[in-house]
Image (spheres, grey):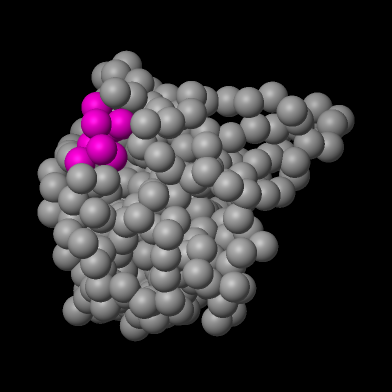
Amino acid sequence: MNGKVPHIVQYQGSKRLLAPQILAFMPDRFNRLVEPFAGMAAVSVAVAQEYKAKSYIVNDINEPILQILQMAVEKPDTLIEQYTATWNEQFGFSDGHVEHFFHIREKFNAGERNAVNMLYLLARCVKGAVRYGKNGNFNQSPDKRRHGTNPNNMADNVCSISHLLKNKVVFSVLDYREIIAQAQPGDLVYMDPPYQGVSDTRDNRYLSGVNFQEFSDALLVLNKKGVDYLVSYDGECGGKAYGEELPRELRCAKMMLNAGISTQATLLGKRHVTYEALYVSESLNEKIKDAPTQMTFWEGAV
């Protein structure tokens, strides 16, 4: 890949570090990349950096997250200017930088759910992890050891992302099934649904869950339309599997990507490698099998 993938802020669950492995299962060129569960859109940014797609659909049901991305692409200077002002407030806040975090969190939960407040909370919270309580309020705690991403460090990445994606993206805040319905042959759909809480129960890390059967049915629709897709889903760590595999009737190939040493296992004094599953649709499978440089990644269909 052409250097490191630029990113706006640390974001738990981001596929930025796995992007080179994921892109290895994509054609050299295709019409449009569709991300129904974009998060911070690390895969779209990586694809743009490699000039693989002509255009993009970037969607996420979490509107403030989507607004960060849209401002970064369409109004990078405004995003950095407003973030800088909010970030600088913490140094003059009478009760200290930790209390400033709670002040912004309270404003966010009271209705000011805009891109800048969301970005500041992400930059300051523990592990860059989005967490919501049962009442729908953001409830993650601040990382008391640091002040969050410095605006000067963030600015270069934001400008790089804007340069890569400006005038090429349609942004939306829709149910993933509505986005999948827009996909056509020639597109590639990359899906990273809520971390294997893929269930119909609400996960406090996300605004809504994803029903396993409904998700599988949506993939069947893509199969029938002949649309290529990739899905990041289950995995394993230390020999222990987590998450439910996608149904075999989808006829996907299942690859295991090395996601590195588990941080949680390290804290427990163990050294386990985490592997994340990547499902490759049958139609895409047929295309990448013909690419000699990618054959070393191939492990066969499930």
Instruction: Indicate the position of residue 280 as horizontal and vertical percent values.
Output: 44, 50
Residue range corresponding to the magenta coloring = 214-221
Q: Is residue 241 above or below residue 302?
A: above
Is 101 on the left or on the right of 298, as rendered?
left
Q: Nearer the viewer, residue 154 or 220?
A: 220
Is 193 on the left or on the right of 276, as rendered?
left
Q: Is residue 91 above or below residue 288?
A: above
Residue 110 lies in the magenta-colored region: no
Instruction: Decide whether the magenta segment is chiefly helix, strand or loop.
Output: helix
Q: Is residue 222 above or below residue 265?
A: below
Marks counted in the figure total 0
Is 111 on the left or on the right of 157, as rendered?
left
Q: Is residue 108 above or below residue 80?
A: above
Toward the right, the furthest residue is 269
- Residue placed at 55% from the left, 81% from the top? 2
> Does the image show residue 186?
yes
Instruction: Indicate the position of residue 84 as horizontal and vertical percent values.
Output: 39, 67
Displayed quadrant of residue 41: bottom left
- Residue placed at 53% from the left, 72% from the top? 291
Residue 217 lies in the magenta-colored region: yes
- Residue placed at 25% from the left, 38% from the top? 220
User: Which quadrant would the N terminus be assigned to in this image?
Assistant: bottom right
Displayed quadrant of residue 292: bottom right
Instruction: Indicate the position of residue 82 as horizontal and vertical percent values.
Output: 30, 66
- Residue placed at 50% from the left, 53% from the top? 15
> Does the image show residue 117?
no
Instruction: Indicate the position of residue 155 as horizontal and vertical percent values.
Output: 44, 75
